[in-house]
Structure formats: structure tokens, C-alpha cells
């Protein structure tokens, strides 16, 4: 027995338009060693899942808020990401580097400091990512915000078809949106 306890957290702002949503049947266990008890994963985060094992993994991505050159070790990214210190971050074909610090004090963006430079220029609106199945194989979006339980797990529902308010969820650029063709990303509020 996994001893999973469901906890509810609410942002209070609906992210889904209408009631014509389709969730993957049966639910899944979010089993991602990147997260610990108390971590909150926002509704609308891209997520992959395995129907056979019933396990899910969150896409750990951040969208660049400003350009960075090929020698920078600090990167300004938009808020509402799920990156954490210790994760290995990547861009394109660059060698992944470990996150040393995340400064969340600015109201408009976070500053991620890596142990070493990615070695390539990274443009505004590009995606930095942790290279795992959460990023490479997203199948839908997290239906509702979840808090990781004491055992490091959480029950999750994954929406695989529906319309989401794109401005109310973590930033998702076109390259990830294309991997989820049955999700409509509405730019209205």
C-alpha cells in the first residue's frame, strides 16, 4: 500500500474554460524524486504519465525572461516554474548544469544561478528544461494544484483534452504545446 493522502490546495482562480474536459482515466501517482513533502505543483503544469505503471512526472521547465549570453551563469526566468536547487538544467544541445540558487525576490522574474555556464546564448522566450520524461513526453496538464505528501507522492488527475486559460498556468511555449494537440491554450483572461 502506498499510503497516499490527498491534500487540497487552491489558487482560487479557475484555469479551465467550460466543462468539456477529458481526464485520463483512473488517476496517477506523481512519483518524482525532484519534489519533497510540502512542495506545491501548480494546476496546468505539463505532465507525462504511464498508463501501465500509473505513474506521472511533471515537466520541469522555465521560460527565459531576458536574453543571456554564452558565458552567463545567471538566467532570468518567468515566475510560476517548478525548478529547484540541485536540478540539472539544459537548453537545446548544451551540456546540462546544476542549479546552485534561485533568487525569487524580484516581482517580475526569478534569477537562476547555475554552477557553470550552459555555454550557449539563450534568447528571451526560450525554454530551459530538466531533460526527463516530464519534458520530453508530456501528454496533458495537471488538472488541479497538488501538494506533495509526507511520503513524497501525490495523487493527480491529468487533463488530456480541454481548453485552458494559458495566462493562468505556468508558461508553456509552442514547442511543448505541440506535444499536447488536444489541449487548446486560450490567451484570454
Image (tube, rainbow, N blue to C red):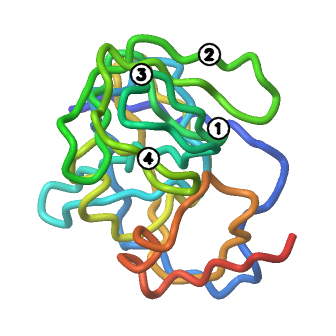
Q: Is residue 117 above or below residue 52?
A: above
Residue visible at 59% across and 38% down? 77
Element marked by disc 2: strand
- Front one among 8 and 173: 173
Q: Residue 30: x, y in percent? A: 34, 43
Task: Say the numbered circle drawn on residue 122.
Answer: 4
Query: Which quarter of the image is occupied by the C terminus?
Result: bottom right
Left or right of residue 56, residue 169 in this image: right
Residue visible at 40% across and 43% down? 60
- Front one among 102 and 13: 102
Left or right of residue 29, residue 171 in this image: right
Residue visible at 54% across and 61% down? 172
- Of pointers 1 and 3, the one earlier in the residue sequence: 1
Choose mark 2 or mark 1, whichever is in front.
2
Q: Dot 1: few (<14), some (14–19), or many (≥20) neighbours within 10 Å?
A: few
Q: Which residue is mark 2?
A: 103
Q: CA distance from mark 2 to mark 1?
A: 27 Å
Asked if labels 1 and 4 touch by Cβ distance under 8 angstroms, the answer is no
Choose mark 1 or mark 3, whichever is in front.
3
Task: Say the numbered circle drawn on residue 73.
Answer: 3
Residue 44, quarter of the rendered image? bottom right
- Of pointers 4 and 2, the one earlier in the residue sequence: 2
Asked if labels 3 and 4 touch by Cβ distance under 8 angstroms, the answer is no
Q: CA distance from mark 4 to mark 1?
A: 37 Å
Q: CA distance from mark 4 to mark 3?
A: 11 Å
Q: Residue 28: x, y in percent? A: 33, 54
Q: CA distance from mark 1 to mark 3?
A: 37 Å
Q: Which residue is mark 1?
A: 8
Amino acid at each position: 500500500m502506498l499510503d497516499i493522502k490527498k491534500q487540497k490546495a487552491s489558487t482560487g482562480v479557475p484555469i479551465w474554460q467550460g466543462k468539456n474536459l477529458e481526464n485520463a482515466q483512473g488517476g496517477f501517482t506523481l512519483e518524482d524524486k525532484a519534489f519533497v513533502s510540502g512542495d506545491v505543483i501548480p494546476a496546468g503544469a505539463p505532465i507525462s504519465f504511464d498508463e501501465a505503471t500509473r505513474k506521472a512526472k511533471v515537466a520541469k521547465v522555465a521560460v527565459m525572461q531576458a536574453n543571456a549570453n554564452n558565458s552567463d551563469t545567471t538566467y532570468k526566468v518567468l515566475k510560476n516554474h517548478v525548478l529547484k536547487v540541485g536540478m540539472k538544467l539544459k537548453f537545446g544541445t548544451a551540456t546540462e548544469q546544476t542549479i546552485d540558487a534561485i533568487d525569487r525576490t524580484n516581482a517580475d522574474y526569478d534569477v537562476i544561478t547555475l554552477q557553470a555556464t550552459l555555454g550557449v546564448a539563450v534568447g528571451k522566450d526560450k525554454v530551459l528544461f530538466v531533460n526527463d520524461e516530464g519534458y520530453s513526453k508530456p501528454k496533458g496538464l495537471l488538472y488541479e494544484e497538488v501538494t506533495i505528501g509526507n511520503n513524497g507522492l501525490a495523487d493527480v488527475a491529468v487533463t488530456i483534452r480541454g481548453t485552458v486559460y494559458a495566462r493562468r498556468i505556468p508558461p508553456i511555449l509552442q514547442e511543448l504545446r505541440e506535444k499536447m494537440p488536444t489541449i487548446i491554450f486560450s490567451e484570454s483572461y
